[in-house]
Image (cartoon, rainbow, N blue to C red):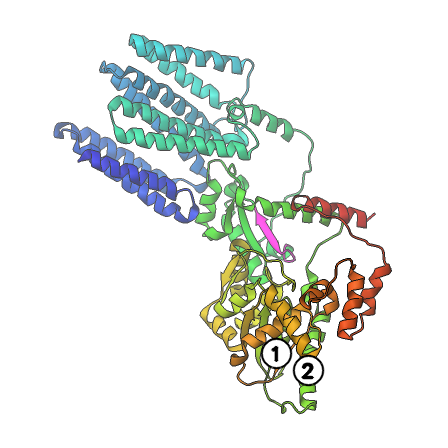
Amino acid sequence: MSELIYLLAAVLFILSIRGLSAPRSARLGNFLGIAGMTLAIVAALALIPPERLLPVVLALAAGGVIGVVSGQKVRMTALPQMIAAFNGLGGLAAVFLAAGEAAADGTHYFASSVGLVIGALAFSGSMVAFAKLEGLLPGKALLFPFQHPLNLLLSIITVLLFFGYSFTHAEWMFWLLAAVSLLLGLLLVLPVGGADMPIVISVLNSYSGWAAVGIGFMLSQTLMIITGTIVGASGAILAFVMTKAMNSSLVQVMLGGAAKNRQNAETGSGEKGVARSGSPEDAAFIMENAEKIIIVPGYGMAAARAQHALKEMAGLLRRKYDVQVRFAIHPVAGRMPGHMNVLLAEADVPYDEIFEMDDINRDFADADVAAELEKRGIRLSSANSINIGRLVPQIVYYFAAYRQLLEAGTIQMGEEVNFCVPTGNFGNVLAGYYAKLMGLPVHRLIVAANENNVLEDFLNTGVYDRNRPFHQTISPSMDILISSNLERMLYYLSGKDSVKVAGWMKDLAEQGRYEVDAQTKEKIASLFLSASCDNAQTSAQIRSVYARCGYVMDPHTAVGAHVLEQLKERLDGKVTVLLSTASPYKFTRDVLKALGEAQEGLDDFACMRKLEQLSKQKIPAGLYALKDMPERFADVISCEKMEEYVIAGAREILK
């Protein structure tokens, strides 16, 4: 029965580690760990004879009281010290158990030696770490002459004593092995300091786990072996991840080389500023013009207990200035693994605003480019999509089209009309929506999409999802991945709820998709229709219209015409206007191909002249004038070289 309970406890410990790997599931992971340990304690107590139970229960109660009081009283900034102390206690427990085995003339000499050596290293090393973190010892690396040769000598002596005791069982060797191991643990941690402390705490945590493995073999306790392996492996993996993030190695950290290099760097020259205090409101106001802000918290936040102020500032930036704020966690930030995650969780910072280093590094690259350009007085902006000078004429087109219908007697004043906008022109859709808000009798706005039908799916389902294959079409679109004009229209459809829209855009930025609420979805369904067609259908539409009317359509307008034929039963009998938003002369080769006309051996301008003969429409003078102009841009840049190219181009402009 006990073995079955131990197995269940081991499973709970594994699930606990899994839960603790992410902030969102950390609380559940903690509870699973508590449940597993409770089961293990109960199973262990059941195996103890009643006459020996009292001292065990008293020890258990004493440890429980110490743990509860420590957990309640410890400050958030003192958590690293508590972790170091608990690691040391785990190592000390292994030393005591090994000593008990030696005193009882046990037979598990090799296993007890493993527990003794690693437990002693964990205990003395953790005590040094505790003293450094608590300020009882200087926090910097403590180095002295011949330190590394001395550590090497002690390591050799430890190995010799380890095997000597394992084979000779001499009691004096056991106690000498314990003393040398304790001294070695102390000397190994002394040269570690500063930003390397989280790494050494992970290493010491790993030591305590491997010590438990040795004691588990000594006591033939399967649960201790499993649990010790979990703790030892997870600590080792975490230490490796952190040393990688510090561009260092575990050997360098434990030998004090990394800390020494950083100390040398810190004593060099560098910028020194003046610290100024201010409120979260002041800080938010200073950053109001930012679009995206990444906050990387460190131990300064812990020491100042500033996590609540940071959360308040981030909330103000979002609500008041519509700024995207995220928190980036460096694996070695603070003084213990996960220190910053704990503090941000205490301040109730939402888990989906906290990102690990690998998940947000790419955004820092973009920020580096922006910062480099900012030094030169350049700020890149996608201002074109909100250019009011472009939007106003588009609104006017709707009213002008309505007036022409009135003058032709096609409709009566006040009669509602449908407008169909071809693919890639959501700015025109927004203009039509504004025209409706201004009083134009618009019945339906019909969005005609090509194969990249993100907008079609959104308008029909309420889900905007750009996580899909990209198709090369003959009617290229701009508004298929991130449509800023759609965002502006959603602001009105959501009842001008900027917080709600910002949440959708945040989902889009982080997940590549978002879904609007039922009320907004209902408003979209009441106003919009949408369908799509592929390249073959677009070409067929161009050919069909030319055969019937002698009119040459551009591919965009052809997409709109095809969609109108698909949706003709849903137009409610209303007069429908198809917006022709492009010229066939911009797509001469695709149009000629659709019409079945040969173009081999013809350059683009010869294709224009051939299309002019077919359409009886003059080539736009400005477009044909390009024939005699020099080619200005011929560079091809890979994605990896894009940032470098932008910075180089900015430097060239400012020469």
The local secondary structure at tag 2 comes to: helix
Is residue 346 shown left or right of residue 636? left
Q: Is residue 447 above or below residue 235?
A: below
Is residue 265 shown left or right of residue 76? right
Residue at 72% from the left image edge and 66% from the top image edge = 597
* Figure disc tally: 2
Q: Residues within 10 Å of mark 1 (few under 14, many from 20)?
A: many
The local secondary structure at tag 1 comes to: strand
Can residue 91 be seen here? The reply is yes
- In the rendered image, residue 211, in percent from the top left (x then y), is placed at 35, 24
Q: Residues within 10 Å of mark 2 (few under 14, many from 20)?
A: some
Is residue 471 shown left or right of residue 224? right
User: In the rendered image, which residue does mark 2 sit on?
Assistant: 401
User: In the rendered image, which residue does mark 1 sit on?
Assistant: 419
Quarter-wise, where is residue 573 in the image? bottom right
Task: State if disc 1 and disc 2 touch (CB < 8 Å).
Answer: yes
Magenta range is 287-295
Which of the two labelled residues, at mark 2 and mark 1, occupies the earlier sequence position? 2
Q: Amino acid at mark 1?
A: Phe
Residue at 36% from the left image edge and 26% from the top image edge = 210
* Separation (CA) of disc 2 from disc 1: 10 Å
606 or 294, nearer to the observer: 606
